[in-house]
Amino acid sequence: MPVKSENNAITDKSMPRVFNDLITTANPESSCFYLEDGKRAAIFVLKQKRQYHVMTFNKNFSLLWGRKSGLLRC
């Protein structure tokens, strides 16, 4: 999560909307927030049956942080 765009997302209230959407829609089983290379990072453990659901969450975070994020499907 790039710090500048994340701070902007906090100020304009777009980040809470994206996180709330993820929490209510995906219902993550677990999440972890940490620092990586001096930037904020997060891991969400999701149990999704359909790939397109994960892609929707990925798109929302990518738009929020200027294409500097991504969710991995394992």
Image (cartoon, rainbow, N blue to C red):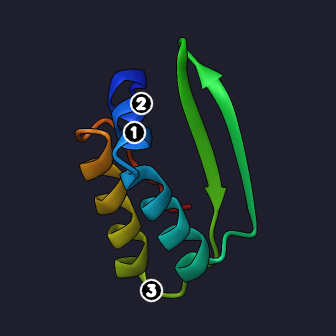
Counting residues from the N terminus, which is met first, the one under dot 2 or under dot 3?
A: 2
Which residue in the protein does label 1 denote?
11
Q: Residue furthest top?
A: 38
Inspect the image, locate mark 1, and give the three-letter code of the amino acid beneath it. Thr
Question: Does residue 4 sit above or below 45 in this rendering?
Answer: above
Q: Which residue: 52% across, 60% down? A: 19
Is residue 35 toward the left or the right of residue 2 in the image?
right
Inspect the image, locate mark 3, and give the three-letter code of the amino acid beneath it. Arg
Tag count: 3
Counting residues from the N terminus, which is met first, the one under dot 3 or under dot 1?
A: 1
- Residue 50 % position (x, y): 44, 86
Quarter of the image with the C terminus is bottom right
From the viewer's side, name the closer residue of 49 and 29.
29
Disc sitting over residue 43 in the figure:
none
Secondary structure type for disc 1: helix
Which residue in the protein does label 3 denote?
50
Question: Does residue 47 sit above or below 33 in this rendering?
Answer: below
Which residue in the protein does label 2 denote?
7
